Amino acid sequence: PNNLCCFVCNNYPWESFPSIFELKMLVHLQLRHNSLPHLWTETKHLPSLRRLDLSWSKRLMRTPDFTGMPNLEYVDLYQCSNLEEVHHSLGCCSKVIGLYLNDCKSLKRFPCVNVESLKYLTVQDCSSLEKFPEIHGRMKPEIQIHMQGSGIRELPSSITQYQTHITKLLLWNMKNLVALPSSICRLKSLVSLSVSGCSKLESLPEEIGDLDNLRVLDARDTLILRPPSSIVHLNKLIILMFGGFKDVVNFEFPPVAEGLRSLEHLDLTCCNLIDGGLPEDIGSLSSLKKLDLSRNNFEHLPPSIAQLGALRSLDLKDCQRLTQLPELPPELNELRVDCHMALKFIHDLVTKRKKLGRLKLDDAHNDTIYNLFAHALFQNISSMRHDISASDSLSLRVFTGQLYLVKIPSWFQHQGWDSSVSVNLPGNWYIPDKFLGFAVCYSRSLIDTTAHLIPVCDDGMSCMTWKLALSECDTESSDYSECDIHFFFVPFAALWDTSKANGKTPNDYGIIRLSFSGEEKMYGLRLLYKQGPEVEALLQMRENNNRTFHWDKEDSI
């Protein structure tokens, strides 16, 4: 019928369209998932057509002639994987608002586009398109252009000429992009710039420091070896990322010179950094909270890292040539290192870094390493020279290991899975001046835990109860992971309350119970003594609630 306004026929099965199709009142034409290699070969007069949707037309090789569609506003060509050409007549359609060609991987010819009314232009993932279409008309300030993943070799000058208001310029995965024009540095409103995955891009413009409002700069997986010295003038920059080099090249970061005053996250992963690649004055990055230096080749780190007073997270994973850990910043909460490095420096990590609470050990692949870590961790707690008391920071300190496998080390003799655990204590378990407390670990999220010391006989004796506010130890830099194992120590001096004992001794209490706020946990527990062979003979466990726990005969720490 001549008055038809909307025609929708998805999955159109035939390979040609009726030649008589010419409806003066048609506003919407939708033929998604059709089998047409072309819609029609001659010019059709569709004066009322506002939207043409041919998305997911896998066989479509070229668009129709747009000359007879003067009022066209939207053209949808999503994932037309064989589309090779957009007809040049599209440049005459001055009312087009949205033009969507996402993932047209065969598109090679897109001669021109009229931008008088255009608000949305998408050529994202058009990997065969090497040249941006010629612009007809004056570009509107509010236009959004998406060209990530395209094969375009250079940015159109019209972007920097008319897009001075633009806040985001996302150019990631443009494999053919070899350079950025210096004119992008005139985009004074630019907040985020991403060239990640532009694998042929070798440099940033020297004037990059003129982008006064830039907050995020992502240049990972490029060929940029030396950022321009002006980069340190980006005093509003919060996130800066480089790295991902596949070839043997050495990255060099320029002297900070007290610049980058707002930088909070610096990612230099896999930059092939060697000694001297990091600036000696890196410690002047006063706002830096997260520093990722993993997969690099340096042997030493600049001593000024210790001056990063705001640093909370440091990643040194897979730094195979690193021989020693640097002096760490005082507020550091999270450290990611290889197992051999963690075990080598565990004493300093426990005794000197009071704020350190999370160790990520991605290469802890077996139970032997798990046991070494647990043994070393609590051995260093027990070797503290001063007495462990209720006021000691270790009493509420949690070490979170993000391990390769979610598994409780067998070093903990008492293990299970429950929302609470009750363990019978051996006779005469308490040895004055020898017993330190209870080594505990559990999996998954960090929550408050309550420890109860329960009498052997129910003769009116009070339980000794202590609530550990462990969740308060978690920080913003520590993201919860299913691989988290939390290790902490319940000091006996904090649990034992003489005022409630009524003349009883600790050996009158025969059960230790831990409650995990109603949430089931994979847990482990071990009694912790100062070193001494006479302790071993006293550690005989007995049945508890029809559950038998076997104490192995390894030396107690």
Image (tube, grey):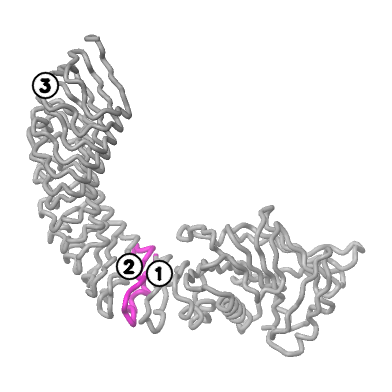
Residue 180 lies in quadrant: bottom left
Kindly identify which residue carries mark 1. 315
Q: Is residue 142 left or right of residue 13?
A: left
Q: Position of residue 145 (x, y in %)?
A: 20, 41
If you read the primary sequence from the N terminus, does the residue marked by circle 2 or circle 3 appear first?
3
Q: Is residue 508 left or right of residue 349?
A: right
Amino acid type, label 3: Gly
If you read the primary sequence from the N terminus, does the residue marked by circle 2 or circle 1 appear first?
2
Give the distance between the C-alpha atoms of the residues marked 2 and 1, in whole angstroms. Answer: 9 Å
Kindly identify which residue carries mark 2. 269
Q: Which residues are magenta?
A: 285-310
Give the distance between the C-alpha atoms of the residues marked 2 and 3, in whole angstroms. Answer: 54 Å
Residue 114 lies in quadrant: top left
User: Residue placed at 23% from the left, 55% from the top?
Assistant: 195
Q: Is residue 444 magenta?
A: no
User: Residue placed at 39% from the left, 73% from the top?
Assistant: 316
Crowding at mark 3 (Cα within 10 Å: few <14, some 14-19, many 20+): some
**Of marks 2 and 1, the one in the foreground:** 2
Amino acid type, label 2: Thr
**Of marks 2 and 3, the one in the foreground:** 3
Q: Main secondary structure of the magenta part?
A: loop
Are the residues flagged by discs 1 and 3 in contact, CB closer than 8 Å? no
Kindly identify which residue carries mark 3. 68
Question: Where the C terminus falls, by quadrant?
Answer: bottom right
Q: Is residue 245 left or right of residue 441?
A: left
- Residue 190 seen anywhere in this rendered image of the structure: no
User: Residue placed at 26% from the left, 38% from the top?
Assistant: 58
Q: Is residue 305 magenta?
A: yes
If you read the primary sequence from the N terminus, does the residue marked by circle 1 or circle 3 appear first?
3
Name the secondary structure under disc 2.
Answer: loop
Name the secondary structure under disc 1.
Answer: strand
